Image (tube, helix red, strand yellow):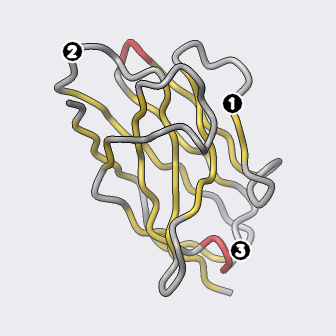
Amino acid sequence: QVHLVESGGGSVQTGGSLTLSCTFSEYTYSPYCLGWFRQASGKERGGATSISTLGIKPYYADSVKGRFTISRDNAKNTVRLQMNSLSPEDSAMYYCAASYSHYCDLRSPFSYWGQGTQVTVSS
């Protein structure tokens, strides 16, 4: 069991930046894979990025590659998402998720989810 709590969402103008944070707790073993997903209003949830315990070669969806950066601090039980060059298309509820699978991309079976934090980008 892993408890995940996101924070850092808010409103920003096009071209702006935001940093989301997710703290994870109440686990027996630290989850191998952590990911960020997002769901825009009226659309299906999609994956943005994921990172393994060692933080080597994070995976990025094409839609965020070059603009978003995921990082993980295992000592602080935190995973962050730095988002730059935001556009209205990035507006969505952003969710942090955890997986114990030993492969870490957006197809990994994420079993634990946070409640989400809203990001709104205005033009």
Residue in the image at 43% along x and 41% along y: 110
Query: Is there CB contact under 8 Å for labels 1 and 3?
Result: no
Q: Which amino acid type corresponds to the residue marked 3 in the rendered image?
A: Ser
| Left or right of 26, for residue 87 | right
Q: Amino acid at mark 1?
A: Pro
- Which sits in the foreground, 23 or 99? 99
Q: Image quadrant for the N terminus?
A: top left
- Helix, strand or loop for disc 3: loop
Location of mark 2 (residue): 28
The x, y position of residue 81, in whole percent, is: 56, 44
Q: In the picture, which quadrant includes the C terminus?
A: bottom right
Rendered location of residue 20, percent (x, y):
47, 49
Structural distance between the alpha carbons of marks 1 and 3? 22 Å
Quick check: marks 1 and 2 in contact, CB under 8 Å?
no
Q: Secondary structure at mark 1?
A: loop
Q: Nearer the viewer, mark 3 or mark 2?
A: 2
Q: Against 29, is 113 above or below? A: below
Q: Nearer the viewer, mark 1 or mark 2?
A: 2
Which residue has dot 3 on it?
87
- x, y percent for residue 109: 47, 39
Label 2: which secondary element: loop
Closer to the observer: label 1 or label 3? Answer: 1
Q: Kindly identify the amino acid type of the residue bearing the numbered disc 2.
A: Thr
Residue named by callout 1 = 58
Using the image, determine if residue 105 lies above or below residue 30: below
Q: Is residue 12 above or below residue 38?
A: below
- Name the image quarter holding residue 15: bottom right
